[in-house]
Each structure stands twice: as C-alpha cells, then as structure tokens.
Image (spheres, helix red, strand yellow):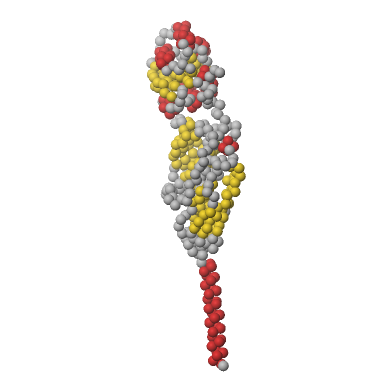
Amino acid sequence: MLLLSKITFSNRRYILSSILFFFVLLIHTVNAQPKITFQKSEHDFGRVANLSYPPIAFQFTNTGSEDLAILKVNREPNIMVKFPRKYIKPGESAQVFILPDLNTLGTFNKKITLITNASNSEYQLTLTGEVIAIQECFPNPDNWNIREIHVTDAVTKLPLNDVQANLIHNDRYQINGSTDKKGIWTGEMKIGQYNFNLAKAGYQPLQKTQYIGRSVPIIFFEMHPIDQPPIEPDPIELENIQKSIEEPINIPQNPNQLSRTEYGANNLVLLIDVSLSMRTGKKLDLLKQSINNLIDVLRDIDNVSLISYAESPKILIQGIPGNQKTTLTNQINGLEAKGITRGVKGLHKAYELAQQKKVLQGNNQIILATDGQFTGGSINPDEIRQFIREQAMDGVTLSIIGFGVDQEAKSFMAGMARAGKGKYIHVNTKDDISKTLIDEIKENSRIKK
C-alpha cells in the first residue's frame, strides 16, 4: 500500500511537471511570432485630381520575435500595391507603397488587406479622399499660371522642406524659390519648357527638363538621399495600373494665346536696332524681354524672320516656324548693341524678306524696334515714308516699337508707322509692352468673318 501510494504520488508530480512544461512552451510559442505594426493605417488624400501623384508610403515594423513575411494582398484591380518580397527581421522596418487609380470623379474609400505570417495575420489599410477636376487644383483660379511644385523623399515618400528650386523658363527667364514645411513651392509659371534644378543638403541634386502645359497645376519631384543609392525598378512589383485615356479638359485659354480659329497665319519680320544708342537706359534688354514674350505665343503656322542692324543689316533667322522657340530666343538673347545706325538699309532688307515669305491670306508685318536715331547717312524722311506707304499698299504692314525721349525721333517714328498702316508703340524705360505688341499682332491677323 505504501509503495503504491509513493508511485501514485510520483506520477502525479510527473504529470503536473509535464503540464507546466507544455504550458510554458505554449506561451513561448505564442510569443515567439512575428508581429506587424504600422505607423499609420489610414491616409486621406484630401481633394485631388487625376495627376501623376507619387504612391503613398505606409511604414511598418516587425515588433515580434520571428521573421515577418507579407504573403498576399487583397485589393481592387485599379490599385497599385508594392511591398517587400522578403523576410523582415525582428525590429526591422519596411514600407508598403499604395496608389489608387484616380480617374473617377467623386469621393472614394479604398480598403487594402495584407495577409501575413504574423499573429495578427490580417491587417487593413485605408485610402480616402475626393477626386476633383483638374481645373479646381490650380492654386489661384484667377491666374492659371500659378502652379505648385511638390518635392518628396524618394525613399520615405515624405515631403521635403527647404528645397532650393531654380527654374529656367524657355532658356532665358529664371525663377527661384524654396519649398515650405509641406514640401510645396507655389509660384507663377507660364506654359513652356523648363529646366528644373533642385538642391537640398543631404540629397542628390536633381536636374530635369520638362514642358509645362496649360493643364498642369502641380509638378511632382522625388529627391534621393546621398547615403541611399537610387532605387532601381523593382522586378517584384505586383501590378501596374492600366490608366484609362484622359478626357480632354476645359481650361480657359491664356488670353494672349493665338487661337487657330480666330487668327490667321503670321509672316513676321523682326527688325532690331542694335546700334550703340540702344545700350543706354537698358533699351535693348527691355526689348529682348518683350520680343521673347511675343515668341511665347507664336505657333507652327507662323513664320518668323530676324534681322539686326547697326552699320549694316544682318539676317540672323530667315523664315522659321514660330514654334521653334529655343532657336528664336537664343538669337534674341545674343543681340549686342554696338556701332552706328544705318536704319534705312535695314528697313529695305526687312521689306525684301517680308515679300519673299509673304502669306496670301494672313498677316504680313514688319516689327521695327529702334530709338529712332537714324544716324550714319543722309536721310530724306519724305522718301522713307513714301516707300513705306507703297509697301503697305502691297500688303506689308509696319509697326514700330520706339524707345527714348527724343521728341523729334518719336515724331519721325510715329509718322513711319502711320504710313505703314501699323501702330507706333512707345516704351518707357521700365515698361513691358509684351501685351500691347501681342494685341497688335492679333488685330492684324484676326480672321474676318
């Protein structure tokens, strides 16, 4: 009886010990699992348009004690999801990148479910927002040239503040600024070609050339940290969104643009005085700015020639389409003032070129830019005006951009413009006469209905 009691007691202790061991093992097994913990599980886009937004980064950490793996993602077909296809070690962080297709106007609420090997095996991420028309994204509805530049970190996708931005518009105008704490710079950017130069301490400099059209309210850039190599295309990316064809949008035209339905083709000869007198008062610099602004609105159906003159006329460009803006602006910006004025020779050469490139149903026009000091030879004002009058009767108009304060010169130029059936546009030292000049082109090229 005593032996039996001892054996029974020993068995009881063994059984209790075994139960305790398995219970401890069970607790260790439960605790020794991966666990996925996100910094945030929701992102609100706010009011956005169908633009090329960078994907949203959701950062997570494996807060468990075993390797973590994302096994599967459940989401709608029009949502791009990119996640690491590798084990995430305990304590290691990584990111899931998500971008919905933003083609449909209205509010949205998207759910993305991640299936993992963690104890909390399913984890849900949410995207909300409202898709609006592109027109509503312009920062200033009264000025369609006001746009935004958004800069983010290429790795974290977080906004970058204090990014120094240098923009060169059509290879001539410089715009400078810096991003705010939201990674946004807001400023006036007319349509055209831009060279973007972005710089920030700790990041690789970014240089990019891009054409900015009327329907682009926001431009997005990503900058790579210096200590991070550029991100190569990921061969394991799950999906690429099949973007639908964008519907044309109705954004108001720039009032300075030349509509093909309203304005016929232009045959323009720019006759530029580069004599020494044009150097005073920065006349030539002001003229370059005004002519370049005119070039901005010209089209491929417009024909442009450029003649400079001082001691003798020089044909710099002979009849190229108006959309070859870089060629035109480079020549304009390269003009230098020197020598004496022999304006009559330049005027004869301009009319000769205008007649050669004449368009039958359009505007044939010479734009003479000068301070009116026709020195360097004998001049008969009556003969000059008669010659201009005859050319006007033959369909070539003369308009004059006049600089300086000499009253005699101003009177002479105004008389020439009247004889040429054009306008005399006087310029003060700080005037930008671009709009007046463009209005002059519009008036002469407007299609008669």
Q: Is residue 148 left or right of residue 316?
A: right
Q: Quadrant of the C terminus?
A: top right
Whether residue 255 is visible here, answered yes or no, is yes
Q: Residue at x 59, y 37 (%)?
A: 136
* Residue 305 placement: quadrant: top left
Q: Residue at x 47, y 7 (%)?
A: 386
Q: Residue at x 50, y 50 (%)?
A: 81
Q: Residue at x 56, y 86 (%)?
A: 9
Extreme residue in the bottom direction: 1
Q: Position of residue 440 (x, y in %)?
A: 53, 19
Q: Position of residue 371 (x, y in %)?
A: 47, 16
Q: Position of residue 102 (x, y in %)?
A: 55, 43
Q: Is residue 341 left or right of residue 128?
A: left
Q: Position of residue 447 (x, y in %)?
A: 53, 19
Image height of 440 relative to 139, above or below: above
Q: Nearer the viewer, residue 345 or 300?
A: 300
Whether residue 187 is visible here, answered yes or no, is no
Q: Quadrant of the N terminus?
A: bottom right
- Number of numbered labels in the structure image: 0
Q: Is residue 227 left or right of residue 39?
A: left
